[in-house]
Image (tube, rainbow, N blue to C red):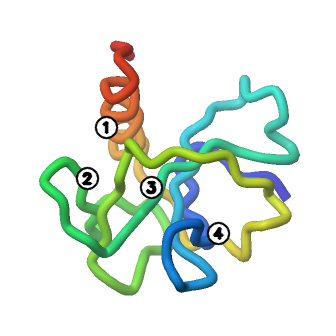
Amino acid sequence: MGYDRGDVVKGPDFFGSSPFRPWVCVQDDTHPFESQEGIFVAVTTTRRSEAIPLTDDDFVTGGLPRASYVNPWTVTTIKHVDIQQREGVLEDDTVEAIVDDLCGFVGHEC
């Protein structure tokens, strides 16, 4: 199963003691291995001034059970087989804001 830009998934937690954490898929269909893996940014429950808050209005479908924030500077590749499930799908405008911030953190204007 592949994941698309804007999907919020339950994937491995590389940073904490929990086995899983939410991630937002940010790649588009030009990713060379999109059927096997994706580019994801971390979602956390820790509020930071640079993080992007997620509200119920940001979701087209699904959602998260707790107040959550996207850290667009925390980027990784995750194999689709390591993802447990899809938690929801974000609105296009929300995904664009995440990607714009990500680009800024790597010194590129999107």
- Residue 60: % across, % down: 44, 60
Mark 1–mark 2 distance (CA, rounded to whole Å): 8 Å
Q: Is residue 19 above or below residue 50?
A: below
Q: Which residue is mark 2?
A: 52
**Which residue type does callout 2 highlight?**
Ile
First in sequence, mark 1 or 4: give its number.
Answer: 4
- Residue 39: % across, % down: 63, 42
First in sequence, mark 1 or 2: give its number.
Answer: 2
First in sequence, mark 2 or 4: give its number.
Answer: 4
Mark 2–mark 4 distance (CA, rounded to whole Å): 19 Å
Helix, strand or loop under label 2: strand
Residue beneath the point at 78% across and 47% down:
37
Neighbourhood count class around disc 3 (C-alpha, 10 Å): few under 14, some 14–19, many 20 upward: many
Helix, strand or loop under label 3: strand
Q: Is 58 in front, or is 49?
A: 49
Q: Which residue is mark 3?
A: 90
Helix, strand or loop under label 4: strand
Mark 3–mark 1 distance (CA, rounded to whole Å): 11 Å
Mark 4–mark 3 distance (CA, rounded to whole Å): 16 Å
Q: Nearer the viewer, mark 1 or mark 4?
A: 4
Q: Is residue 86 above or below residue 110?
A: below
- Residue 55: % across, % down: 26, 67
Mark 1–mark 4 distance (CA, rounded to whole Å): 22 Å
Q: Is residue 30 above or below residue 6?
A: above
In the image as oriented, which residue stretches furthest toward the left? Answer: 49
Neighbourhood count class around disc 4 (C-alpha, 10 Å): few under 14, some 14–19, many 20 upward: many
Left or right for 44, reference 11: left
Q: Which mark is residue 11?
A: 4
Q: Contact, CB < 8 Å: mark 2 with mark 4?
A: no
